[in-house]
Image (spheres, coloured by chain):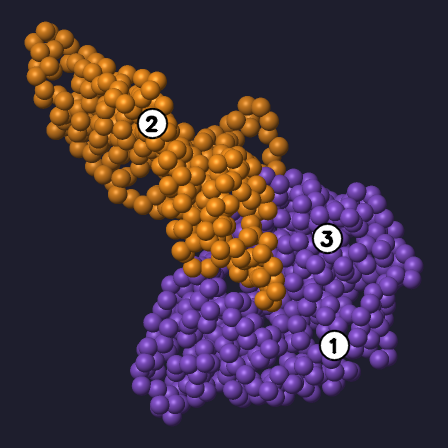
Chain colours: A purple, B orange
């Protein structure tokens, strides 16, 4: 494209965007989105899987929302403050908020939600471990007092981590069998209307939403389409307007992105920061040897994986923390693609061609292709790789029983190393039966201490220093082989505006979205 | 006849119970369990959560105890509770049953009607171009994997021509009622029902053709010809009727699987039926739901076997019931 054409295009874009701004959000319209798999329930206090959060994140709300940079934004709390010693957090709630059934939302609901979630929400339980007490001095004030400063505390209030539950519906009932679980009642911008199991979930606009002028969209239909190819076709034929990240196989993304009126973005995953790596069994076999593990890092062409398998989206991971996570540092040892160096390290490690079992992640064709690519990289430097095929439960069992040498995975990091990073490297998290803890069996007392100190250090600068040190040690030791900071592309009609405005993207995005007519 | 039916039902109950026990152990032999799958989906790695889930689902009990409780439930017609869907299994199955019956029933009717028709035509015009065309087409549809046919049908009729919807049971959000709704559902039904129907149609056509040619060589057909009956009457009244027994057997077997739905077709076309429910239950190791679907499907297969035996009698009065 010539410079002139580029300038003309830019000028046109400026005119168009100015026109869009001038027009502003328009009320009305219906959006068809895809949800997969079908959520088991929309009651966010009881079920925390991805599809539930994606749909119900528009029904329920948390006290805070988070910007793409993970700075807290007002949610059900309009202001908040932290005491000088970092132990007392005071939230002022938005006044005049009502539940979808018309009852007022008050600080009593917040207190009730905390107790509710301690019983039902595994992640919330972990996040609240330092909570000493929570009090409600008046109807619109909530005060959290911690046993000691807990750095990540201000980051635990998004809707998926700490959704507000209506006290008047659940108090004194059996939470799990409460009939209201089938007709969730929140304070969010959309209200539950209908669920035809196996077909669609319908949400409608909350006319009494506490943010004036929002939401703009009248209705959202979440279409349940189990096959990835069928989801692509549904978008292509105009039956759906929004394909949230991960809805289609990556090889379909370039084709779909060329369709008329189609926009693609990798934004909206900053809070989760899905971080992918290879579990390396540190206990036995070749992967128990640090030099072998370092050799793997040099042997794998992660840039090619990013460009080919992931269509250029995401970033090559430099270590245990994603770059969107607090206290991330890039000042760590580097492992650029260097097969010669990998071969030299393998020689030093004394690797003699033993078979190494590799488990791909059974999440579809994209992951299968990535595993094939890694196998080729490893075979190129002389590693004898055997691929083991499993389905999801089989993968879970093999990994949680430590029955593997190399296993693909990715996990969410939840904005802070104390929440989503430390659990994979500290010794206290070595326990059979779960595929989400320190599965590799890495044990280093210095790392244990750093993560223990980092969680409760105060102020922020102290935490920063601790986590920088931890990252350096881990990257040197290579307990796992970090691959990519993933970005799952969200594909939408360009006429659906303003869908992704926060760090959790589509999960609470329809509040601000509007449709250009 | 009544004692024949009573004895067959008694035997069917024993077979069904044996199947329940077999399926119970088969499912548990597969690696992984629902607790770990659900913990993974929730992004919760803590041991306590997984242990709590296992306790909640009764998976911490010894296997014989789990089996005893399950069989006890079955005997009181309770199919249990779905771990993942958090609903009674019977409710889930009943919710999906109408869609599945509509799909498989339509496919069954299409395949049986057109399969017999094309098979009879091929036999009637054996050795001609029409016979060759039907036989080759039947062979192609019989040999082509269903999912491929489904995807090609979507590409052709939904993407390229935009004639038919590619997924779902109805147009979401259209709010159609009455006849408009019927036509809308019918439009959604065409591609999945034809996809399943083509395979079985090919089977019926091949079987009808072969059977009719065989029967056509028997002496009674020669007698009919000698009596001066027209060829059409001979084919329709004498040959076809006698050639239908193997087709009835096959149709009985297919009818038994109607309730189980069609896993691949329902998945590709996002048809909200039992086949998809079963597929998702398998991926999530939702033991009770999977077993529940198996129980219902097994019961239907046994029931249709019995019905097939009864239909034999009406097709061929020479067959007698022996208890």
Quadrant assignment, res A467: bottom right
The label number, if any, that marks residue B8 in the structure image: 2
Residue at numbered disc 3: A60
Crowding at label 3, few (<14), some or many (≥20) Cα neighbours within 10 Å? Answer: many
Of residues A181 and A322, which is closer to you in this image? A181
| Callout 1: SS | helix
* Residue at 63% in and 88% down: A469
Q: Position of residue A12 (x, y in %)?
A: 64, 61
* Horizontal arrangement in the rendering, residue A381 relative to residue A314 (left or right): left
* Horizontal arrangement in the rendering, residue A244 relative to residue B167 (left or right): right
Q: Kindly report which numbered mark, 3 or 2, lies closer to the viewer in this rendering.
A: 2
In this view, A113 is above or below B96 = below
Residues at marks 1 and 3, CA–CA distance in whole angstroms: 25 Å
Crowding at label 2, few (<14), some or many (≥20) Cα neighbours within 10 Å? Answer: some
Q: Position of residue A84 (x, y in %)?
A: 86, 79
* Horizontal arrangement in the rendering, residue B148 relative to residue B71 (left or right): left
Name the quarter where the N terminus of chain B is drawn.
Answer: top left
* Residue at 77% in and 57% down: A113
| Callout 2: SS | helix
Q: Are marks 3 and 2 in contact (CB under 8 Å)?
A: no
Q: Are marks 1 and 2 in contact (CB under 8 Å)?
A: no
Q: Position of residue B183 (x, y in %)?
A: 51, 27
Residues at marks 3 and 2, CA–CA distance in whole angstroms: 55 Å
Q: Are marks 1 and 2 on the same chain?
A: no
């Amino acid at each position: 494209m010539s410079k002139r054409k580029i300038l003309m295009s830019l000028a046109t874009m400026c005119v168009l965007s100015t026109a869009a701004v001038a027009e502003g959000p328009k009320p009305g319209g219906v959006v068809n989105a895809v949800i997969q798999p079908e959520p088991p329930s929309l009651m966010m206090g009881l079920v925390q899987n991805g599809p539930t959060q994606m749909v119900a994140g528009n029904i329920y709300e948390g006290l805070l929302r988070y910007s793409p940079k993970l700075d807290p934004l007002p949610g059900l709390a309009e202001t908040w403050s932290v005491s000088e010693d970092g132990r007392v957090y005071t939230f002022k709630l938005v006044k005049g908020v009502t539940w979808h059934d018309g009852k007022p939302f008050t600080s009593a609901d917040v207190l009730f939600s905390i107790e509710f979630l301690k019983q039902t929400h595994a992640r919330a339980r972990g996040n609240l471990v330092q909570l000493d007490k929570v009090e409600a001095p008046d109807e619109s004030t909530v005060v959290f007092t911690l046993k000691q400063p807990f750095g990540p505390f201000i980051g635990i209030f998004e809707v998926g981590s700490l959704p507000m539950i209506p006290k008047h519906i659940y108090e004194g009932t059996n939470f799990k069998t409460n009939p209201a679980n089938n007709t969730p009642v929140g304070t969010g911008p959309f209200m539950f209307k209908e669920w035809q199991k196996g077909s669609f979930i319908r949400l409608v606009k909350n006319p009494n939403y506490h943010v004036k002028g929002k939401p703009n969209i009248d209705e959202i239909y979440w279409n349940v389409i189990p096959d990835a190819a069928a989801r692509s076709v549904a978008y292509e034929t105009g039956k759906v307007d929004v394909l949230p990240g991960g809805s289609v196989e990556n090889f379909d993304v370039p084709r779909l992105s060329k369709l008329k009126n189609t926009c693609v973005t990798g934004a909206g995953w900053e809070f989760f920061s899905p971080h992918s790596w290879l579990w390396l069994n540190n206990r036995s076999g070749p992967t128990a040897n640090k030099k072998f593990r370092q050799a793997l890092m040099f042997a794998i062409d992660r840039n090619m994986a990013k460009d080919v398998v992931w269509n250029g989206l995401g970033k090559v991971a430099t270590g245990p923390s994603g770059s969107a996570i607090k206290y991330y540092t890039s000042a760590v040892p580097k492992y650029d693609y260097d097969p010669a160096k990998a071969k030299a390290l393998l020689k030093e490690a004394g690797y003699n061609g033993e078979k190494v079992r590799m488990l791909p992640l059974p999440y579809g064709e994209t992951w299968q292709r990535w595993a094939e690519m890694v196998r080729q990289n490893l075979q190129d430097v002389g590693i004898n790789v055997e691929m083991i095929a499993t389905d999801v439960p089989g993968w879970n069992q093999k990994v949680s029983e430590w029955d593997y040498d190399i296993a693909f995975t990715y996990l969410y990091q939840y904005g802070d190393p104390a929440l989503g990073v430390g659990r994979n490297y500290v010794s206290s998290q070595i326990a059979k039966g779960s595929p989400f803890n320190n599965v590799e069996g890495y044990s280093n007392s210095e790392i244990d201490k750093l993560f223990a100190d980092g969680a409760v250090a105060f102020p922020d600068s102290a935490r920063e220093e601790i986590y920088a040190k931890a990252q350096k040690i881990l990257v040197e030791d290579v307990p796992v082989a970090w691959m990519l900071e993933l970005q799952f592309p969200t594909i939408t009609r360009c006429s659906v505006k303003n869908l992704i405005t926060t760090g959790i993207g589509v999960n609470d995005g329809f509040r601000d979205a509007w449709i250009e007519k | 006849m009544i004692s024949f039916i009573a004895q067959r039902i008694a035997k069917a109950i024993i077979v069904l119970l044996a199947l329940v026990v077999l399926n119970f152990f088969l499912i548990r032999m597969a690696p992984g369990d629902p607790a770990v799958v659900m913990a993974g989906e929730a992004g919760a790695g803590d041991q306590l959560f997984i242990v709590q889930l296992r306790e909640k689902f009764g998976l911490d009990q010894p296997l014989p105890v789990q089996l005893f409780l399950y069989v006890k439930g079955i005997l009181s017609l309770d199919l249990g509770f779905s771990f993942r869907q958090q609903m009674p299994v019977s409710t889930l199955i009943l919710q999906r049953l109408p869609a599945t019956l509509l799909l498989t029933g339509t496919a069954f009717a299409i395949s049986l009607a057109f399969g017999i028709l094309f098979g009879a035509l091929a036999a009637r015009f054996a050795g001609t171009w029409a016979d060759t065309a039907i036989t080759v087409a039947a062979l192609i549809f019989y040999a082509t994997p269903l999912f491929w046919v489904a995807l090609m049908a979507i590409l052709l009729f939904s993407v390229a021509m935009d004639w038919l919807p590619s997924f779902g049971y109805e147009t979401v959000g259209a709010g159609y009622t009455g006849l408009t709704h019927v036509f809308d559902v019918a439009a959604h039904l065409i591609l999945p029902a034809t996809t399943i129907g083509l395979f079985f149609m090919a089977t019926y056509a091949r079987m009808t053709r072969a059977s009719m040619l065989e029967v056509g060589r028997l002496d009674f057909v020669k007698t009919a010809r000698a009596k001066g009956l027209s060829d059409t009457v001979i084919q329709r009244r004498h040959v076809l009727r006698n050639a239908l027994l193997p087709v009835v057997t096959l149709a009985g077997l297919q009818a038994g699987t109607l309730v189980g739905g069609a896993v691949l077709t329902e998945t590709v076309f996002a048809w909200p039926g039992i086949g998809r429910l079963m597929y998702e239950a398998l991926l999530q190791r939702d033991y009770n739901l999977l077993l529940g679907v198996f129980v219902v499907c097994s019961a239907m297969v046994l029931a249709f076997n019995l019905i097939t035996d009864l239909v034999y009698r009406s097709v061929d009065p020479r067959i007698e019931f022996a208890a």
